[in-house]
Amino acid sequence: MNALKTSFRKILYYPSAIVGLLVVFLLVATAVYAMVSIPYDEAIRLWRGGEEVWYQNPKFAPPSWINFFSSKKYAESFSVRTTDGSLVKEVTPGAEGTATLSASYAFNFTYDYYPQDLILYFTSNFVEKQPFVSVEWLTPDGRKIRLTNLALTQKQAYRFSQDDKLKNRLRTEDIIPFLFSDPETGAPVKGQYQLLITGATFEPDSNVDIEFVFHGQVYGLAGTDQSRRDLVIPLLWGAPVALAFGLIASLGTSVLTMIIAALGTWYGGWIDELIQRITEINLVLPFLSILIMIGTFYSRSIWVILGATILLSIFTGAIKSYRSIFIQVKESMYIEAARAYGASSPRIIFLYLIPRMIPLLIPGLVSAVPAFVFLEASLAVLGLGDPVLPTWGKIIQDANSNGALYRGYYYWILEPATLLMITGLGFAMLGFALDRIFNPKLRDI
């Protein structure tokens, strides 16, 4: 045990190990943050909720930080509503239960690209007489444009770009560019714009709540996909899923492989023969093809895939490597001494044989994690990932099926791909350093 502690202290002498530990620490911290800030049920609801959850977000929007690297600025998305006070509403009571209402919102438009769309969501309560609203648009150059007059239903959405009457009145097919452009030159007009909403209710206790959604060209820290979903959710939750899959598969495979090799070596005879024959058969089986068949015909649950992965990865060439080392350890003097004082076979296997192999187990265990992480992502890219979980591979699969590269949405693939590469690099660097520390043949290299 002291030797093991001493070996771990040597990690600090290897810069690659320090970098690897830093990467692993950041991944673990990200995983913990994701699970604490976005609980599992909430993450699943957000990932699978559909447009009713993500209606405030634009489609196919790159992350907002690309504005720092672009000479021309893209419009950033936002939303305001009367329910939380970000959109101020004033109500003036009238006679016989009627009331007038007014709401306005001013914002600065300093971008070189127009937004995707502008949307108003109205939520009203009434019995018989529908509330009525009028919407106007004020530009920095002093123009006032009447957009629409609406008799409201209980829930109603007004999309500026889809108002055919407004198109005819303004004599344009592209309403959004018209609202933000100089009518003479057609160039974007920068400055303060204002949305004015006035209306009336005609019954006691009747009320109207308003939400204004500005769908820009960019959104948030990670952008959005074809379903308006914020990619921060799967990027954050991809970390705990990837780490859990990689660590459980690596630990389960390494430990079970070592135990089986130790049992076969110690007992010998037909047990050792059976283990060796199973290993030889498993070595020629198409590993990935079997997983694809399981995902296609049985279940795509990540737990089923994880169990199949561990089962198919136990009887590999590592069993033969461990067996050759166990045969040498089996003849050691301390093993003979244990036999002499009557130690049982399980005691010898688990307290004398296997502990001697831990220094060789640790580097292999760490180095195997990226392979299993990439395996889970690869299955997801092939469409065989868990349909419930938001993962890095699922992002890449969605991006590929929606032609992200052909349509110029590079962020959609680069973000999860970068995280996968960083994960692989971190564990590989740490595993390489641990191999040099624990493997006597590499200590002087």
Image (cartoon, rainbow, N blue to C red):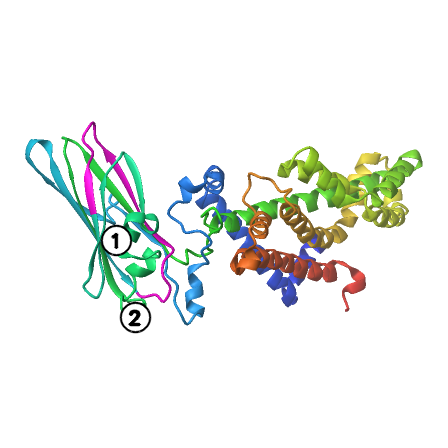
Which residue is the site of mark 2?
185
Q: Is residue 360 above or below residue 286?
A: below
Label 2 SS: loop
* 361 lies left or right of 28: right
Q: Is residue 340 visible?
A: no
Which residue type does callout 1 highlight?
Answer: Arg
Q: Is residue 119 magenta?
A: yes
Label 1 SS: helix
The quadrant in which residue 342 appears is top right
At which x and y percent is residue 207? 20, 36
Q: Nearer the viewer, residue 434 or 217?
A: 217
Q: Is residue 114 visible?
A: yes
The quadrant in which residue 157 appears is top left
Which residue type does callout 2 highlight?
Answer: Thr
Q: Residue furthest bottom?
A: 71
Which residue is the site of mark 1?
169
Q: Is residue 258 magenta?
A: no
Start and end of the magenta stretch?
110-134
The quadrant in which residue 259 appears is top right
* Residue at x 33%, y 60% (from the top left corner): 177
* Residue at x 42%, y 60% (from the top left corner): 64
Q: Nearer the viewer, residue 62 or 173?
A: 173
Q: Earlier in the sequence, mark 2 or mark 1?
A: 1
* 129 lies left or right of 187: left
The mark closer to the camera, 2 or 1, is 1
At which x and y percent is residue 444? 77, 68
At which x and y percent is residue 147? 24, 51
Q: Residue furthest right?
A: 269
* Residue at x 47%, y 56% (from the top left corner): 222
Pointer 2: residues within 10 angstroms few (<14), some, or many (20+)? few
- Quadrant where the C terminus sits is bottom right
